[in-house]
């Protein structure tokens, strides 16, 4: 059974907590990552988090899952949600189960945010619950991995 979870954050999420609290809350990415790491550790799992503004960095980190035993991915692709077939293809290629997370309710926002290149491949999608959405996704990932042989 894999005991490793990867959390990926897309472009501009490094700005969290600074501006746009109406859509994205006041937690910083460090706040979110710290809470997730604590929760994973308490359950006996390892968690790695990466934020990048570069599509190829996220893609190459996903490719690494072919060799590093990652058992589950939580991903907030941010703006790449609506644009990146390449990032979608990377997830499809490695076949690691993933949950798509969005801080905001993208379905209540601009039309361009209401299409995702990831949702049909995802195990599930959580949006509009702020940073709690990441924690809910992690709880599911831990349960999923705990049920694996
Ligand atoms: O709701 C999300 O988590 C989302 O994935 C996140 C996004 C996102 C991510 C980071 C930054 C911004 S805009 C921003 C700019 C400055 C400070 C805070 C946010 C949007 C959007 O591009 C997506 O449409 C929706």
Image (cartoon, rainbow, N blue to C red):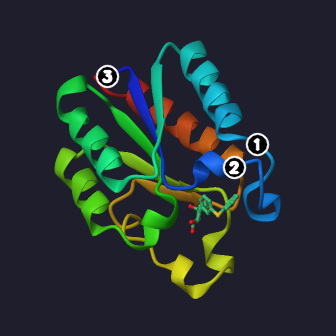
- Helix or strand or loop: what does disc 1 sit on? loop
Q: Position of residue 139 (x, y in %)?
A: 57, 35
Mark 1, other Cα within 10 Å: few <14 / some 14–19 / many ≥20: some
Q: If the image is split into quadrants, where does the C terminus sit?
A: top left
Figure check: 68 above or below 144: above
The residue pinned by badge 3 equals 2
Q: Position of residue 91 (x, y in %)?
A: 27, 52
Viewer-closest of 86 and 116: 86
How many marks overall?
3
Q: Is mark 3 within 8 Å of ligand 1?
A: no
Viewer-closest of 134 and 9: 9
Instruction: Measure the alpha-carbon separation of dots 3 and 1.
Output: 29 Å
Mark 2, other Cα within 10 Å: few <14 / some 14–19 / many ≥20: some
Q: Residue at x 71, y 33 (%)?
A: 31
The mark nearer the N terminus, 1 or 2, is 2
Q: Are marks 1 and 2 in contact (CB under 8 Å)?
A: yes
Viewer-closest of 87 and 130: 87
**Front disc: 3 or 1:** 1
Figure check: 122 above or below 73: below
**Front disc: 1 or 2:** 2
The mark nearer the N terminus, 3 or 1, is 3
Figure check: 30 above or below 3: below
Instruction: Measure the alpha-carbon separation of dots 2 and 3.
Output: 30 Å
Q: Position of residue 21 (x, y in %)?
A: 81, 58
Q: Quadrant of residue 2?
A: top left
The residue pinned by badge 1 equals 27
Left or right for 27, reference 72:
right
- Helix or strand or loop: what does disc 2 sit on? loop
Quadrant of the image where one finds ligand 1: bottom right
Q: Residue at x 82, y 63 (%)?
A: 22
Q: Is mark 2 within 8 Å of ligand 1?
A: yes
The residue pinned by badge 2 equals 16
């Amino acid at each position: 059974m894999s005991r490793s979870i990867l959390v990926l954050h897309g472009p501009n999420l490094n700005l969290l907590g600074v501006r746009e609290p109406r859509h994205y809350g006041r937690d910083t990415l460090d706040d979110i990552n710290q809470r997730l790491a604590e929760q994973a550790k308490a359950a006996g799992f390892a968690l790695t988090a990466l934020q990048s503004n570069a599509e190829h960095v996220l893609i190459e980190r996903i490719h690494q899952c072919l060799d590093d035993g990652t058992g589950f991915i939580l991903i907030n692709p941010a703006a790449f949600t609506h644009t990146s077939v390449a990032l979608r293809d990377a997830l499809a290629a490695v076949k690691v189960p993933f949950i798509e997370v969005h801080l905001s309710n993208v379905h209540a926002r601009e039309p361009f945010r209401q299409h995702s290149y990831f949702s049909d491949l995802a195990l599930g999608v959580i949006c509009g619950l702020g940073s709690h959405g990441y924690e809910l996704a992690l709880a599911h990932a831990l349960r999923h991995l705990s049920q694996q042989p």
